Image (tube, coloured by chain):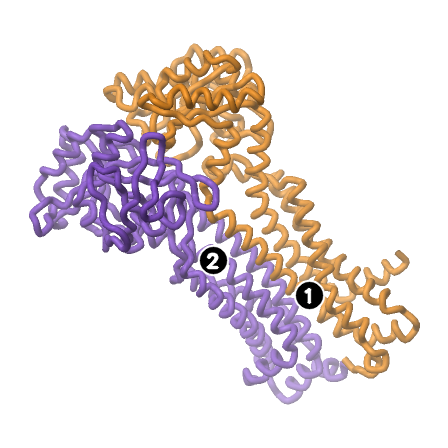
Amino acid sequence: MIPLKYNVRNLRVRWVNTVLSILATGLVVWSSCILFGFVEGLQYSLNVSGDPLDMIVLRKGSTNETNGGYDESKADSILTLDGIARDPQGRPLASIELLNIPVVERRGGGRANIIVRGIDPVARELRPSFQIIAGRDFEPGKAECIVSKNLSKRFAGAGLGELLVCGDKEQYRVVGIFTAGGSAAESEVWVDRQDLEQRTGREGSVSSVQLRAASAADYDRIKSTIENDNRFKLAPLSEVDYFAAQSRSSLFLKVGGTIIAILLTAGAMFAAANTMYAAVRTRTREIGTMRALGFSRMDVLFCFLGESMLLCLLGGALGLLATLPLQVITYGTSNFDTFSEVTFNFRFGPLVMGVAVGMTLAMGLVGGLFPALRAVRMDVIKALREV
Amino acid sequence: MKFLGYILRNARRSPVRTFLTMASTTVSLFLTMVLLSYFTVNDAVADSIKLLNRIVTMSSQGLAQPVPIARVREIAALEGVKAATPFSWYGGKFNEEVMPFAQFGVDPSTIWEVYDELSVPEEQKKAFVEKRDGAVIGRRLAQDRNLKVGDPLPLKQDLYPVDMNLTVVGIYDGTPDRDLRMCFFNWDFLNEELKSRANGQMADNAGVVIAKVASADLMPTLSKAIDASYANSDTPTRTQTEEAFAKMFSEMFGDLKGMIRWISLAVLVSLLFVAGNAMAMAMRERTTEMAVLKAIGFRRGLVVTLVLAEAVLVAGLGGAIGTLGAKVFFDLVDLGKYTAGMLPFFFVPWSTALIGLGASLFIGFASGLLPAIQSARLSVIDGLRKVV
């Protein structure tokens, strides 16, 4: 075994090449990590929302809350079903909700659809760690709204105290800013349901009912009633499944990101190979000496593979480290399932780690393999004679 | 020019290195082309729509809000409007596939006047008007799904509470920068189904109204006039040019755009390091040779030029293969097939390819600069003495 110190010293001697290679691989790993960090952030925002006993009731055939709804009378009957969990005051944990999707201007230009959700008071209890972080909650009937922290930073008129203009007739005064533990609600504007009904002329219709069952057995019973009873004939979905199905827009990012990462890795592989070929070439005599001293072919192979790995690992680590400042960035794009804005934070998790490690290994191994093989195949006598 | 042979030989001296540098440039430029084209294609299409003089009327409260069907006739009757059609996104499932391709309920008697850049055989136009459940689909959609005139096209409900069992009665065609993967069907059919099978839920909604205007200068005044006349109704509207309407969708990508630009930039900078590294290694191995060149009377400027020319040549070749390769690749492979209507077409425009080529030449130049200056500064004595 040739000590690793040999490789470290070699990298130090050719420091200009080393630094350039590290920077190149670091940048490549960094840009892929950014993409996957956002994919991970998006998935997280869709996953965090689901309590296994939570259910969302949509119109049959619809895959999405934003795709039409049903009559309020049906929703009212759902609230009377047995087996719905209750809050300390004895109210059922079931919330009738109505959505509107106006086009709003982003601060800094561009437009996007955003979700305005008309809610009943109980809705807050169905969102994990709902919290008002500035201002106060809205009062019904006063055309007031509360805006998620992420949206308030990103949309014109969505700041505290400003007037959010969704349409000629639909305007709300922003009285509070809320967070909801990173869940999907963090990309929404909340108003009183009656307020929204009146302003959009949709009295008597609802988009969805969200409820929490008291137990798993209750959950199954409620589900089959809503599905089969002639009063309802609606589509009850578990919230977990519902949000999982919505991550299709993250699939788009994921496929795109994977293609980009593969191409970037290929490009960086060539670069690593280039550096290692030069390393092998300039050290021909050294390799001959090592072989003459009795190091085996395997030793030499591992030595050069190790050096290539070390080089790429340094780059990979640099790339990963460089993503740390990104954790504070909020990112917004459209969820093409609901055609509305989703905001999420860069998230450093297993996916990002996996991508970084995978890319680094691929670059180091494949990039180092052929130069190392060349070093192994060298004839000892000829190598020693080389000038 | 007489040094071209020397430059070429130098580039070929270490074929593995030259190949690896070129390959790295090729891959990076290919990727950059893919990233940048995504936006240039979107912009190019939005620009080409400009010439078609269409305006789109939607609810001022967003796409989810209805526009009453009566608006279509009222807008069509305005002076300067040639024809108008409802344009209602159905968003149905096909074989349980969610959002398989774009489907719109339209007026079969005016749609081809509004979309006059699409071509449909006359007898198919007639069949579309006459057959209640008829559908006209794009040529590429027909190819992807292997659909012919006469085939059934069952769409399952998602957004609307009724299924649509359609029959293909026609196939439209158009230039490659048009979406040839849409499905048009009769809006009246959808409305009748809603009334007879869903208690009229969501009925009488035109979705949006698309109108063909006689000339471009009429568009702003017409848009304003339409919005003004409905401002105090229950369903106020927002009317904009089709270009602005399309841009609204591309603006929805939000930060994705900026991020892709940053990634492209990072790729190019990283490529600069890669190419610079390769050139520096090449020069180190040739120290003695450079000293000899100078000893026999080559001027500094010439030495710099020789090194730079080699760097530009290698990077430029790699870049040319990457950019033109991307152009040819996406001309041959139709990416739209695999994106479920998200991306109806994808190609690398010449302008983008030229930018990529320019970027690779610049990278060659910049990567050769430092090694070139170093070899120009090299003292002849030191260089001759150095054993590599």
What is the letter of the orange chain?
B
B149 to A133, vertically: above or below = above
Please say whether residue B171 is visible from this viewpoint: no
User: Viewed as shown, does residue B275 lie left or right of B84?
Assistant: right
How many labels, in total? 2
Q: Which residue is labeled 2 in the image?
A: A34
The chain under label 2 reads A
Secondary structure under tag 1 reads: helix
Answer few, some or many: residues within 10 Å of disc 1's Cα (few below 14, many 20 plus, some between 14 and 19): many
Residue for point 84% across, 80% down: B384
Quick one: quadrant of the C terminus of chain B? bottom right
Alpha carbons under labels 2 and 1: distance apart: 25 Å
Q: Position of residue A246 (x, y in %)?
A: 34, 44
Q: Residue at x 56, y 42 (%)?
A: B39
Q: Quadrant of residue B374?
A: bottom right
State whether residue B76 is above or below residue B353.
above
> Which residue corresponds to the image point at 43% horizontal and 24% vertical from the top-left?
B57
The kind of residue tagged 1 is Gly
Q: Amino acid at mark 2?
A: Ile
For label 1, the residue is: B276
Compared with residue B20, is residue B62 higher up or lower down, i.e. above or below? above
As drawn, is B262 to the left or to the right of B64?
A: right
Q: Which residue occupies the extreme front position in the image? A: A161
Q: Give the percent coordinates (x, y) of residue A381.
A: 73, 83
Q: Quadrant of the N terminus of chain B?
A: bottom right
Residue A285 is situated, as x and y percent measured from the top left of the image, at 71, 82
* Chain of the residue under the numbered disc 1 shown in the image: B
Q: Please say if A114 is above or below B265.
A: above
**Residue furthest bottom in the image:** A293
Give the secondary structure at mark 2. helix
- Chain A as rendered: colour: purple
